[in-house]
Amino acid sequence: MIMIKVVLATRNKNKINELKTFFNELSDLDITVLSLNDIGYYAEIEENGRTFEENAFLKASVPAKLGYIGIADDSGLCVEALGGAPGVFSARFSGGDDEENNDYLLQKLHGEPIRDAKYVCAMACVFPDHSKDFTVRGECYGKILTHRQGDGGFGYDPLFYYEPFGKTFAEVDMAEKNKVSHRGVAMRSLIKKLTKVLS
């Protein structure tokens, strides 16, 4: 069994645990997942890319420069009627928190009959020598409701209606959501590719 350390370019414990869970389920790699804090990196990483892939690559490059295999994700919501917005600006769409972002989205879509949208997650894996760098993408399609439903999840989940479930992402548990979510799809693709690259 291959033993390897990767650094997920985040300080979010939920993301770390989520990635560990996916590795345990999907890979034969003996993986240790570290955070930025674990390697003593406390500075903020500027996300000034124009695409999800560019932002993910920028973040993953930080631990790679310190000698680790870096992994990072960037995700957001793309709404058809808004020309793909908020896109890479999803977390700061309104300049406020999740509640304000949801309010702003509803305001922008007021009276709009076309409610199609997709969640997008890009994940990048960057090596110290850049010999095997790659990015993967996961997408999940749904519709934006005219009002919130459910009190779970985060971000735009209370407004993101996933038709096969007949519910919003805020109305299902994390395990159910991960089976179909953009992050779940991207993580599975990343682990499959990383396992192949290192085997």
Image (cartoon, rainbow, N blue to C red):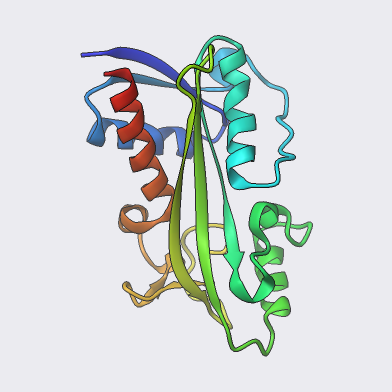
Q: Which quarter of the figure has residue 46?
A: top right
Q: Quadrant of the N terminus?
A: top left
- Coordinates of residue 180 in the picture (x, y in percent): 34, 58
Residue 47 percent across, percent down from the top left: 71, 38
Q: Residue at x 51, y 34 (%)?
A: 124
Left or right: where does residue 126 sit relative to residue 51?
Answer: left
Residue at horizontal 58 percent and vertical 55 percent from the top = 76
Q: Position of residue 39 (x, y in %)?
A: 56, 14
Residue that protrudes farthest toward the top in the picture: 67
Is 110 situated left or right of 38 in this image?
A: right
Residue in view at x 69 percent, y 85 percent? 110
Quadrant position of residue 43: top right
Residue farthest to the right? 95
Q: Give the quarter of the image for residue 179.
A: bottom left
Give the residue drawn at x 51%, y 14%: 68
Image quarter where the C terminus lies is top left
Asked whether 123 or 40 is in front, the reply is 123
Please indicate whether residue 89 sits to the left or right of residue 184 in the image.
right
Is any atom of residue 169 visible in this view?
yes
- Above or below, 90 against 148 in this view is above
Q: Report x, y in % for residue 136.
A: 45, 41
